[in-house]
Structure formats: C-alpha cells, structure tokens
C-alpha cells in the first residue's frame, strides 16, 4: 500500500489531534508521533504549531478563501443571492469544523497572544474572511448589483458573525442541534440581500 507523503500525514494527524484534544494540548511531539515521523521531520515542513494550525484551516477545512477570491475577481457570475448563499454555506461549515479546534486557545491567555502574533506574521487571522466577503461585496457594488450606499463591511461582518454563531450557539437548545446548513445559508443570504441589494436586482 502506498504511503502518503509526510506533509499530508502531518496535516491529517494535526487535524485529528486538534479536534480531539484541542489546539492548546496538541503538541508537535504528539502530532509527529501520530503522523509516524520525528518531531524534527515535522519542522522541515512547518515552522511552528501555529503555522500548522493555519495550514489545517486553509488546506483541510472547507475552502472559503478560494471561493471568495474567485467571486471577487469575477463579480456578476450567478445571482447575488446564489453567491451569498454559497459563501454562507462554506462559512458555516468552516466555523463548524474550526471552532472545536480553536476554542481551547481562549482558555490560555499567553497561548492566545502567541498564536495571534504568529497569525499576524503569516498574514492570517479570523478577520480575513470578513475582509474577503467585504472585498466581494465591494466588487459587486462597483458592478451595480449592491446598493451604492450599502455598508459592505458591516454586511460582511453580519454574514460571517451569524455563521460563526451557528458553530456553538445552539448547543443548549432542546434538541442541541444546529440549523441545517443549506437552509440556514439560504435564509441568511436572503435576509442580508434585503438591506444591500440594488433596486433593479431581483430577489428570487
């Protein structure tokens, strides 16, 4: 049986450990052991655990960033509602899968500070998806599909904030279940459209 490349094994092991024990407790030594390699080999591919975390988010979880980049580069494809629905769907899945990994950071102030410093150095961080949605909405604004007076950054913050809330806000309800992602994304997109869509753009 063909063995997976070391980098792939490390990412898979990191993803699994970060999900099961949390980012704070998943050490590079444990990740290397789970990947079947040495800790020195892990550092050939990744400079730190923080970088490994970013790579897990960007390579192993739903591909939100490529979607936003694609839409921003070519606004006007599909309907605004369809595009926002897909953004909301991918964002909801992203937060659903990343929240259990990142939650433990908030319990350790020093670890969180070190992690934030590394994210800044890598040009990454939780603000990036908001900026990505804002960039897409501004592109649609320039194309005339979003109202000229719409606050695109506020709209992006509302969209991504709701998707992030879905990851944990429903745990204490009677069912303990999140709203189904497809229906949630469609409702969120349609509601947001009511505040930002240009008058001549039809809402389906």
Image (spheres, rainbow, N blue to C red):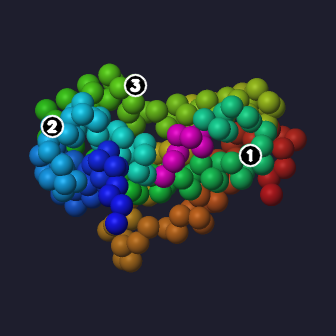
Q: CA distance from mark 2 to mark 3?
A: 25 Å
Viewer-closest of 37 and 67: 37
Kindly state the secondary structure of the residue where label 2 is placed. Answer: helix
From what the image shows, is residue 204 above or below residue 41?
A: below
x and y percent of residue 35 in the render? 22, 54
Mark 1 or mark 2, which is nearer the start of the sequence?
A: 2
Mark 1 or mark 3, which is nearer the start of the sequence?
A: 1
Q: Residue at x 56, y 40 (%)?
A: 66
Asked which quadrant contains residue 169, the reply is bottom left
From what the image shows, is residue 171 above or below residue 14?
A: below
Q: Residue at x 32, y 29 (%)?
A: 119
- Please report contact status of discs 2 and 3: CB closer than 8 Å, yes or no: no
- Magenta stretch in the rendered image: 62-68
Q: Main secondary structure of the magenta part?
A: helix
Q: Residue at x 38, y 56 (%)?
A: 97
Which label number is shown at residue 123? 3
Q: Dividing the image into 4 quarters, which one contains the C terminus? A: bottom right
Magenta-drawn stretch contains 65? yes
x and y percent of residue 102 in the render? 28, 47
Residue 130 in view: yes
Kindly state the secondary structure of the residue where label 1 is placed. Answer: helix
Q: Residues within 10 Å of mark 3 (few under 14, many from 20)?
A: few
- Mark 2 = which residue? 40
Q: Is residue 179 left or right of residue 141?
A: left
Query: Outermost residue, right direction?
Result: 200
Q: Residues within 10 Å of mark 2 (few under 14, many from 20)?
A: few
Q: CA distance from mark 3 to mark 1?
A: 28 Å
Q: CA distance from mark 2 to mark 1?
A: 48 Å
- Mark 1 = which residue? 80
């Amino acid at each position: 049986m063909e063995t997976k490349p070391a980098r792939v094994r490390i990412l898979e092991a990191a993803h699994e450990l970060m999900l099961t024990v949390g980012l704070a407790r998943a050490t590079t030594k444990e990740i290397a052991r789970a990947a079947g390699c040495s800790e020195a080999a892990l550092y050939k591919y990744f400079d730190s655990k923080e970088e490994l975390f970013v790579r897990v988010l960007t390579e192993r979880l739903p591909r939100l960033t490529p979607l936003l980049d694609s839409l921003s580069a070519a606004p006007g494809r599909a309907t605004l509602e369809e595009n926002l629905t897909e953004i909301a769907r991918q964002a909801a899945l992203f937060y659903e899968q990343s929240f259990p990994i990142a939650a433990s950071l908030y319990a350790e102030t020093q670890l969180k500070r070190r992690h934030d410093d590394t994210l800044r150095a890598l040009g990454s961080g939780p603000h990036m998806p908001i900026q990505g949605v804002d960039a897409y909405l501004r592109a649609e604004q320039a194309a005339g599909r979003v109202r000229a007076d719409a606050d695109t950054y506020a709209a992006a913050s509302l969209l991504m904030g709701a998707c992030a809330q879905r990851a944990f806000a429903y745990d204490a309800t009677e069912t303990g279940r999140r709203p189904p992602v497809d229906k949630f994304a469609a409702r969120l997109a349609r509601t947001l459209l009511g505040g930002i869509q240009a008058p001549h753009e039809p809402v389906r």
